[in-house]
Image (cartoon, coloured by chain):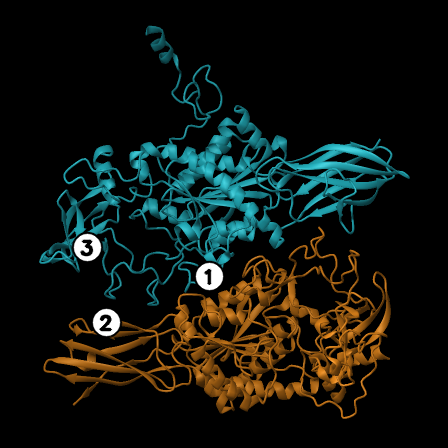
Amino acid sequence: MIPILFALLQTPAAQAPVAGAAPGFPGSAVGYTPKVEIAWNRFYDYAEIHAHFERLATAFPELVRGEVIGHSVEKRELRVYTINAPKTGPAHEKPAMWIDGNVHGNEVQGAEAALYAAWYLCENYGHQAEVTKLLDEACFYVLPMQNPDGRAHWFQRAHNASSSRTGVFPTDDDDDGRFDEDPADDLDGDGQITQMRKRVPGAGTHRIDPDDPRVLVPVPPNERGARGDWITLGEEGTDNDGDGRINEDDPGGYDMNRAWPSSWAPEHVQFGAGPYPLFWPETRAIATFIRAHPNIGGVQSFHNSGGMILRGPGVEGFGEYPGDDVRVYDELGKDGERMLPYYKYMVIWKDLYTVYGGFVNWTYEGLGIVSFTNELWNDGQYFQSAPKPVEPGRDGRELEGSRQRYWFDDKLLMGAGFVDWHAYEHPFYGSIEIGGFRKDVGRVPPTFLIEEMLHRNALFCLLHARALPKVEIVEPVVSELGDGIKAVDVIFRNLHAIPTRTAMAAKNKVGTPDFLTITGKDLEVLAGGYRTDRWRPERITLQDRDPARLVREQGLGGRSELRVRWLVRGSAGTCTVGFEGEKAKRASLEVRLR
Amino acid sequence: MLIAALVASSLHAASAVQADGPPDHRAVSLALAKIAGEHPELAALVPVGTSRGGRRIEALRLAAGERGNGRPAILVVANVEGPWVWTSGLALEAARKLSAGYANDARAKALLDTTTLYIVPCPNPDAAEARFAKPLLEQRAGAPWGDDDRDGRAGEDGPADVDGDGLVTWIRKPDPEGEWMADPADARALVKAERAKGERGTWKLFVEGRDSDQDEKVGEDPLLDVQVGRNFPHAWKEHAPSSGPFATSEPEAQALCEFVLTHKDIALVVCYGAQDNLVEKPKTAKDEGGRGVLTATPESDGALLAEIGKRYGEVTQSKAKGGDDAAGSFQAWCELQRGLWCLDIAPWSLPLDTEAPKKADSAPAPVPGGEGEAPKDAQEKPKEKSKDKKAEREPSDDAKRLRWVDAKGESARFVPWKSFAHPELGPVEIGGFAPYALIEPPAAERAELEGKQVEFLTGLGALLPRVALVDVTAKDLGGVWKVEAVLQVDALLPLTSTAGRRTGALRPLRVELVLPAQGRLLAGDKQTLVRELAGSGGRRELTWLVAGVPPSSISIAVDSDACGTPRATPTVKR
């Protein structure tokens, strides 16, 4: 007892590493201290997110590099942080994983998940073998906030869990020629936009839940003679523009996850799409960056909520994705379901709803990149059990939907998440009550569950990144065919699950095809092609022209190999066989010709 | 001799802008500046954007008097596609005539007193510049896309002037795998052989060029692919090289979209170029098409376009049809996504209706065994083997065009096929229609064509809906006033097109009852949004009950982007 106490007292400062602690911070608790401490039980505003990335850049200057790729409507920075180990090559020569969050301003935890992924990579690089291997082979582009304005507004102004989803480009939601002139109003000045209700004895549509006076329940229409004492009046607010309607023209009023060029549809079909694709400066800047980085082979976009691992298509009419790609999606998605309890791997249009012009639809359908959207957090996690626990009291009814939140809020947050109903004198409705859940309840987890959410989702990104294609060239065999002609046989192998070119990319001729090359001093390449029969070397699908540079539109499939044969003449010494592709590191092999 | 004839023709003098030829970008800029300088009270330059190649895109705004809220505007855009360069001259001519005519032409004055015009003669200057380059080439594309033929090299095998005659025309190569054969009606024209009819192809047809990558294809990987005229969001074709990487990826396309979005006074768009919806009735779809994307002009809009088309025919006598579909076009975006009225005008096309010369003396097919080699096994159709076989086939459009070329003596438009030893393809023939031959009217016809088009344009202001407040009354109900107002549109076009209502992209008309502080609204809406009001006398009645103030202190105020902002005080009704 005494020696332990002594040791603790000798620790010079709380933030310094514990003497003898192992470097890295992989996720097991004993003996590790991170180099950069970030409290993972909080959410951070726009500037704080960037400040944490800058701390990482300072602590890991060789691994982290930030750049400003554009600005939001309110001139906030869109910063992409590149996480790369330069000693194994520059980022653009490696397959890359793109991670972003917070395209919807209120869906804040995506930024922390992106930050967590960057932090985890940095802390563990050079210390944990698998992380080191991953970052030696791949790099990461991390954009924590696609919509920094929406985030800043959600943090700094009165909002609820679902508001500030949009950006803040002035938009005339109510078609009256005035812009953003009738937002919700924080009438009681508590920093939250909660709900309004009014007591109208005997003339209402709702009554107080006998189990919980905070809850209004609708009076069923078939309850003869029963009348409610309450009506609901929607979100806190007044008629700012005097048009007889309340809260009908909030700031912004669009959806930056409906703005992307694939399966895009105009506003009359898809709310929030804007007048043309990539209309808002944030979306255009991000698209420009992604198009300029053809090495991106994986995309992860973080949203909230519901507990979903989503892939396209977003629209039924698009048709199912090619089978070879679906197999990759399924493999990652199903592992994801195990890594993320209460999350479901789903197809957007079929299992959620129709989305035209979604971001991950564009990155896959337009650019051929395997792409997921995760919807972080769901109610099932309140109780870490099946999503509908039976209520412990009274009539044994199930706690459904928001009623679970009341119970949870009472027992685990001591009621801190709920603004109790209180009287307010409304200029239009007269005496009313205002109350409801705070903005940080419902779509984001409470503090003590944040870290778990971030870790599991960040590690899902790493799972995806570990599947990025990795090509090696093996088993060279040189055979003499007589008359000075030699056959060079090699195997091109993709070791990982994602193909070097997805079927979608190949089908639509996206980007650059892969090239399989053979070069050598004074080497004359007579023919080259793909062997179709393991046992009969003369069975080759020949390329018509330019046999020294085979053009491979369909790339190398996931965990597959391709046997290539060249017929050559001339070079006395060695030749070099090479692989070039946009989404995999180059590979080459020296082959002795005799 | 032939070359000399070509150079002498206004069509093919490629190296310089000619006085009677279409204007290049510089000439357009100078002409716009000149008009703005000469008519400062009417004309002003408005920036639209900058092309990928750094050329300024400008609009000339023409308007007389106050340009208050609600005054409608017509946007006139020429040659979004690229090769319709001569229509830039047409747009300039319209600007000149209207600005000069304001002083003494009653119709021009009436138009500019009530309507704003934005004239954009050269929205796609980079592609248009090809019209003035050597060699001469019809160019729709303005930006590279990538590797069209997927051989790992981008833009290495584009069109080129191989025979050095200053024109990029066509190559035909005798080839048993070819799918083209000489048109029986005119051997200079090629038609696709139909194997099912026993026809056999004898030619391969390419655009004129080298085969730099020796893949036996010519012009299959041009340096420039992306067409501004295919880069707009409606029906944009993803992954087609001409469409660009995404809709509005091209600065010219985005600039035009932004111009439309930021000039909410635009009520009508007139486009000169490849498309037509006035001579031929546009394809239409049912007015109520559910929640889906508008795919074609709604029927009721089509009926109004037909009426405008009838008037267009009366003024211009034009039978010129367009040749382009709407996919990715500026016009389609304006009409089917922004809900704007859009008149697509192809002011000239090479006529197809020239009578065939009486004596059938078409030249023999240049390759033995080409046409007329009927298969021996076609016994089931013995009659078709007869000498009437030539007459069976409707002459191809090219054959019909050649009739016009011959009749008019416009020989420079068609370069006779001529043997050439191609460095990669071997013996071939080079010839065919010259660049711009199907696009530009004869120089001698241009002035008349332009005059008629300007006349038609001058009358368009009268078609635009302008909402009037009529019958604004107040009736005393005993201390309470019943206020009534009728909105009326007298012009042909309704307040909003059906496409406009479906898309919801246009701001509705807003009617406000304006009361002094002591006035009390007892019934009715302080503000009414009106989305629908028929043309040709369509009416909408609004009613309020007001107390506390006399009718003379009440106003009915209309607010709109492009159909007027009348305001009225009710007269007391007995």
In the structure shown, which secondary structural element does the residue marked by tag 3 occupy?
Answer: strand
Helix or strand or loop: what does disc 1 sit on?
A: loop
Please name which of the two marks, 2 or 1, marks the residue nearer to the observer.
Answer: 1
Labels 3 and 2 in the same subunit? no
On-image quarter of the N terminus of chain A: top left
Query: Which residue is label 2 attached to?
Result: B526
Query: In front: B15, or B5?
Result: B5
**Outermost residue, bottom side:** B358
Q: CA distance from mark 1 to mark 3?
A: 35 Å
Q: Mark number for residue B222? A: none
Location of the C terminus of chain A (image quadrant): top right
Kind of residue sitting beneath label 3: Thr
**Chain letter, colour cyan in render:** A
Q: Residue at the spot x=79%, y=58% of the render? A: B212
Residue A534 is situated, as x and y percent measured from the top left of the image, at: 72, 38
The amino acid type, in three-letter code, at marker 2 is Lys
Colour assigned to chain B in the rendering is orange
Q: Are marks 1 and 3 in contact (CB under 8 Å)?
A: no
Around disc 1, counting alpha carbons within 10 Å, would you say few (fewer than 14), some (14 to 19), or many (20 or more)? Answer: many
Residue A65 appearing in the image? no
Q: Amino acid at mark 1?
A: Ala
Mark 3 vs mark 2, CA separation in Å: 25 Å
Reading the image, the residue beneath label 3 is A232
Residue B133 is situated, as x and y percent measured from the top left of the image, at 73, 69
Give the chain letter at badge 2: B
- Residue nearer the viewer, B91 or A358: A358
Q: Which residue is mark 1?
A: A265
Q: Is residue B457 left or right of residue B540?
A: right
